[in-house]
Image (cartoon, helix red, strand yellow):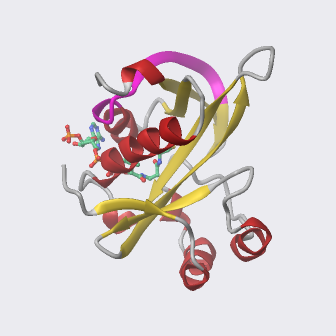
């Protein structure tokens, strides 16, 4: 894998391009993620916590060019404060299919296991999103389950596939 992919925080100079992409192109988030026009409030959220608070965002930087982003949030998993991270990923349309998604998801797993004491990281995607399923598997995640009729998009309820990685699997996957 190339070393040119890295994850970095959002800078103020990145905001205009992020806002433009959300305002102009429904394919910015990909066909399996688009559920109508929305306002992710990039600037106000960035001003609040630099997008490093409860729902962090890191940009996927490929040789100095922004190719997309990853984000994640906490999911309660049981008693006594136990939780895992659930993450998402979006690559800009022109940056898909080049291996960046695999590298970014691997880097994110390494980052989250190194910087928080969680035992588990997970992600889900629609059953039709074969590129994301393949990318997750190449990044070391295990296909775990299908949840039927879980996500509403494009006028229909969609099945989704859950993937997970445990801390002990990072070294061996
Ligand atoms: C999904 C996504 C993150 C994957 O990242 P990527 O950089 O495009 O994926 P990679 O190039 O690392 O790997 C994709 C793999 O899926 C395969 N693939 C792509 N489309 C496929 C399809 N329709 N059917 C089967 N396999 C497919 C590729 O061949 C590749 O596998 P290979 O290396 O064994 O040939 C990216 O395409 C994206 O951002 N899409 C839009 C947003 C999205 O769907 N996010 C997912 C969260 S819901």
Principal secondary structure, stretch drawn in magenta: strand
User: What range of the chain is rendered magenta?
Assistant: 137-150
Q: Position of residue 17 (x, y in %)?
A: 54, 81
Residue most extreme to the left: 1
Say if residue 170 shows up in the picture.
Answer: yes
**Residue 46 to residue 161: above or below:** below
Say if residue 31 shows up in the picture.
Answer: no
Quadrant of the drawing holding the C terminus: top left
**Residue 2 to residue 120: above or below:** below
Residue 149 within the segment the image draws in magenta: yes
Q: How many badges with numbers are in the image?
A: 0
**Residue 28 to residue 65: above or below:** above
Q: Is 37 left or right of 59, judged from the image as shown?
A: right
Q: Position of residue 7 (x, y in %)?
A: 44, 59
Q: Where is residue 151 in the image (x, y as percent from the top left)?
A: 65, 34
Residue at horizontal 59 percent and vertical 28 percent from the top: 118
| Quarter holding residue 91 | bottom left
Q: Is 10 left or right of 97, judged from the image as shown?
A: right
Residues 4 and 21: in front is 4
Residue at horizontal 56 percent and vertical 49 percent from the top: 33
**Residue 147 to residue 90: above or below:** above
Residue at horizontal 32 percent and vertical 44 percent from the top: 102
Q: Is 167 left or right of 78, judged from the image as shown?
A: left
| Quarter holding residue 85 | top right
Residue at horizontal 59 percent and vertical 37 percent from the top: 116
Q: Is 136 left or right of 146, judged from the image as shown?
A: left
Residue 89 within the segment the image draws in magenta: no
Q: Ligand 1 quadrant?
A: top left
């Amino acid at each position: 894998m190339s070393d040119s992919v890295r994850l970095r925080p959002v800078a103020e100079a990145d905001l205009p391009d992020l806002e433009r992409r959300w305002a102009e192109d429904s394919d910015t988030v990909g066909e399996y993620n688009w559920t109508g026009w929305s306002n992710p409030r990039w600037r106000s959220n960035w001003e609040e916590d630099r997008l490093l608070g409860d729902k962090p965002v890191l940009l996927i930087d490929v040789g100095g060019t922004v190719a997309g982003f990853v984000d994640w949030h906490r999911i309660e998993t049981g008693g006594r404060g136990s939780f895992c991270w659930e993450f998402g990923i979006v690559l800009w349309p022109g940056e898909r299919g080049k291996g960046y998604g695999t590298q970014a998801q691997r880097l994110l797993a390494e980052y989250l296991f190194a910087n928080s004491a969680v035992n588990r990281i997970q992600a889900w995607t629609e059953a039709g999103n074969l590129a994301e399923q393949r990318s997750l598997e190449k990044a070391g995640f295990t296909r775990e389950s299908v949840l039927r009729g879980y996500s509403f998009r494009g006028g229909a309820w969609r099945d989704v596939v859950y993937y997970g990685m445990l801390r002990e699997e990072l070294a061996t996957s």
